[in-house]
């Protein structure tokens, strides 16, 4: 009898041991999934990686909030709800630089604003300063007083001025917002820019001796050459009909994506 009690006691102990181990495991599996990022020893999450934008088919957008605009001269503005700001004094001009990938085509600029003024209008200017020729180009959109409330000013540099819609990193681009009133009757929240990536126009003459300007793939080959993705052969040819090795493909991809060795990153002490 004592032998049976001994075995029964051992069995009960084993059951309790199994339960004590499995309950935390089941409890952990019912928790919310990890949102991502490697947890470092300090308990801080590793910085996330942002997705890259590639291709020429999909429209892409960037947002410049009102807080990123600088009032010319003396700063004198107020902060309304939901990110809107308004002018309380000083200059009526608010300016923000435009920073986009080189070569993109700007299709639309939208000013998100609020108009409750019967006599004054909000206006937006998109400007390009040609550094080499010391010349300015600009287009303007404005909204006339109408039904009070939130408004969106839409204008498209693509249709207004060919000098403005193709963005490059050689010149200086800015957006100006004009707030003529000195009260909260005119406000703006920010500017939304819609753009597409493009293939640059080819030059008049070919970079490679075996690629003619009439060839179907001439613009794309020249775009690769201008970007440093392809360098061609030492004899000045591209050899468009020759097969690509895995090594050459690796060179193309690494140059196109700007690939580099992974950097170790540690949080600040």
Image: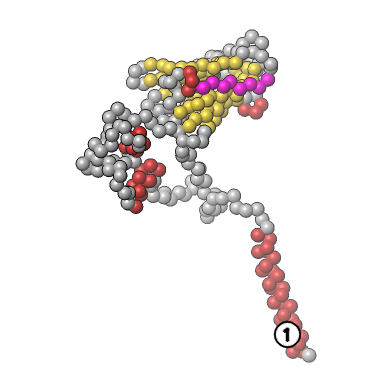
Residue sitting at the far left: 235
Task: Check disc 1: other Cα within 10 Å, few if <14, some if 14-19, many if 20+.
Answer: few
Residue 34 visible here:
yes
Q: How many discs mark residues in the rendered view?
A: 1
Residue 45 at what x, y percent from top left? 54, 49
> What segment is highlighted magenta in the picture?
149-157
Instruction: Left or right? Give the position of 222 relative to 25.
Output: left
Q: Nearer the viewer, residue 269 or 122?
A: 122
Query: In what element is the residue under mark 1?
Result: helix
Pick the residue in front: 224 or 259.
224
Depth check: 215 or 263 in front?
215
Q: Is residue 47 above or below residue 41?
A: above
Q: Residue at x 30, y 44 (%)?
A: 241
Q: Where, by quadrant of the figure, is residue 206 drawn?
A: top left
Quarter of the figure with residue 24: bottom right
Question: Residue placed at 28% from the left, 34% from the top?
Answer: 212
Q: Residue 125 vs residue 225: left or right? A: right
Q: Main secondary structure of the magenta part?
A: strand
Instruction: Assess whether residue 46 is covered by the magenta stretch.
Output: no
User: Where does residue 249 sit, x and y in percent of width and height?
Assistant: 35, 48
Residue 242 place in picture, x, y as percent: 29, 47
Q: Residue at image x 41%, y 50%?
A: 262
> Which residue is situated farthest in the right direction here?
1
Q: Which residue is mark 1?
A: 7
* Residue occupying image coordinates x 40% and y 33%: 199
Tell me residue 48's x, y (percent).
52, 46
């Amino acid at each position: 009898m004592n032998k049976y009690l001994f075995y029964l006691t051992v069995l009960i102990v084993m059951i309790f041991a199994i339960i004590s181990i499995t309950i935390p495991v089941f409890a952990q599996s019912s928790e919310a999934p990890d949102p991502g990022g490697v947890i470092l020893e300090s308990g801080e999450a590793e910085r996330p990686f942002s997705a890259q934008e590639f291709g020429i088919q999909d429209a892409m957008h960037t947002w410049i909030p009102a807080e990123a605009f600088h009032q010319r001269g003396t700063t004198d503005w107020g902060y309304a709800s939901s990110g809107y700001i308004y002018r309380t004094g000083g200059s009526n001009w608010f300016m923000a630089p435009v920073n986009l990938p080189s070569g993109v085509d700007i299709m639309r600029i939208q000013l998100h604003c609020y108009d409750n003024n019967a006599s004054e209008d909000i206006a937006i200017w998109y400007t390009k300063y040609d550094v080499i020729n010391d010349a300015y180009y600009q287009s303007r959109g404005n909204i006339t007083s109408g039904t009070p409330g939130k408004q969106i000013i839409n204008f498209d540099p693509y249709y207004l001025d060919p000098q403005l819609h193709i963005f490059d990193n050689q010149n200086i681009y800015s957006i100006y917002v004009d707030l003529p009133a000195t009260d909260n009757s005119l406000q703006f929240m920010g500017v939304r820019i819609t753009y597409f990536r493009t293939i640059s126009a080819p030059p008049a003459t070919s970079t490679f001796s075996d690629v003619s300007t009439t060839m179907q793939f001439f613009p794309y080959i020249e775009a690769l050459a201008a970007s440093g993705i392809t360098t061609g052969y030492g004899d000045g040819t591209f050899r468009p009909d020759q097969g690509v090795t895995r090594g050459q493909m690796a060179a193309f991809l690494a140059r196109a994506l700007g690939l580099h060795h992974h950097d170790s990153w540690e949080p600040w002490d």
